[in-house]
Image (cartoon, rainbow, N blue to C red):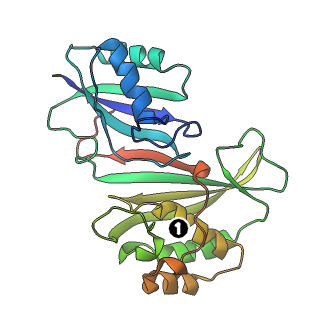
Amino acid sequence: MPRYALQIEYNGAPFHGWQRQKTLASVQGAIEDALAKLEPRTHNIAAAGRTDKGVHALGQVAHCDMERDWTPFRLSEAVNYHLKPAPVAIVNCVPVPDTFHARFSAQERQYFFRILCRRAPATHQKGLVWQIKNKLDIATMQEAANRLLGEHDFTTFRSTICQSLSPIKTMSRLDITQVETLQGTEVHFDVRARSFLHNQVRSFVGTLERVGSGQMTPDDVTAALEARDRAACGPVCPPHGLYLAGVSYPEMPFS
């Protein structure tokens, strides 16, 4: 069965996360339903990461096995046709060897988070950013973020329902930048690791926002990390500012 890697973009607002569910709308379910219109049977696609309810994607990666030899262009066009009107799009499609696995072959996952800092309610960016009213101290936030780089026990920043076998992860990047846009000041987070714990990025952002607003210090973040206690974490920020931005592989399937 020919295998294809799919690069997927979606707005997570109408979905209860990536993972297929029996009675609730999911991104995986929408794509598998579209594939079933092309080859009527049960489809089981695998993805690089299972995003939560309301989380978006710019570069989710999944793979599917088809019975027919499809040209990548025709397959992506046909799936996109049957996905309408759901806010999901196959932006790239390539054939890959049977040894490629969207989840297990991945070397690094990149998440992107957006905070909009302005008092006026968001209009065009509503549902795509976490809006706060105050400006943030980016330099102090970055100082605190640097305390989270490298290998640590991240129990403090782990959801109580996380199913990962170990709380130990290695953060390779946690960069914070301020960007001036037509809609106002945005603060962007670029977070990268081989894998993440459940709610880890949202726990990071919620804690670092407290640092930027002066309610916590970088030393408080170090103490929270070393506490290995969920109660020491700052608030978990809302999902709608979070994006799965990209996935890296030993041999990148997409040009």
Can you see residue 255? no
Front-lying residue, 183 or 33 = 33
Q: Position of residue 4 (x, y in %)?
A: 26, 27
Q: Position of residue 235 (x, y in %)?
A: 61, 69
Does residue 178 sit above or below 25 in this rendering?
Answer: below
**Residue furthest out toward the front:** 23
Front-lying residue, 113 or 178 = 113
Q: Residue at x 64, y 81 (%)?
A: 216
Does residue 143 sit above or below 172 in this rendering?
Answer: below
Quadrant location, the C terminus:
top left
Can you see residue 69? yes
User: Going by the image, does 147 lie left or right of 40?
Assistant: right
Q: Residue at x 28, y 32 (%)?
A: 44
Q: Residue at x 40, y 41 (%)?
A: 19
Q: Residues within 10 Å of mark 1 (few under 14, many from 20)?
A: many
Q: Position of residue 78 (x, y in %)?
A: 40, 14
User: Going by the image, does 130 lie left or right of 142?
Assistant: right
User: Going by the image, does 18 lie left or right of 41?
Assistant: right
Which element is circle 1 on? helix
Does residue 245 sit above or below 144 in this rendering?
Answer: above
Disc 1 marks a residue whose amino acid type is Phe
Quadrant location, the N terminus:
top left
Front-lying residue, 222 or 38 = 38
Residue labelled with disc 1: 204
Q: Which quadrant of the view contains residue 136?
A: bottom right
Q: Position of residue 201 (x, y in %)?
A: 49, 61
**Residue furthest out toward the right:** 120
Q: Residue at x 43, y 85 (%)?
A: 226
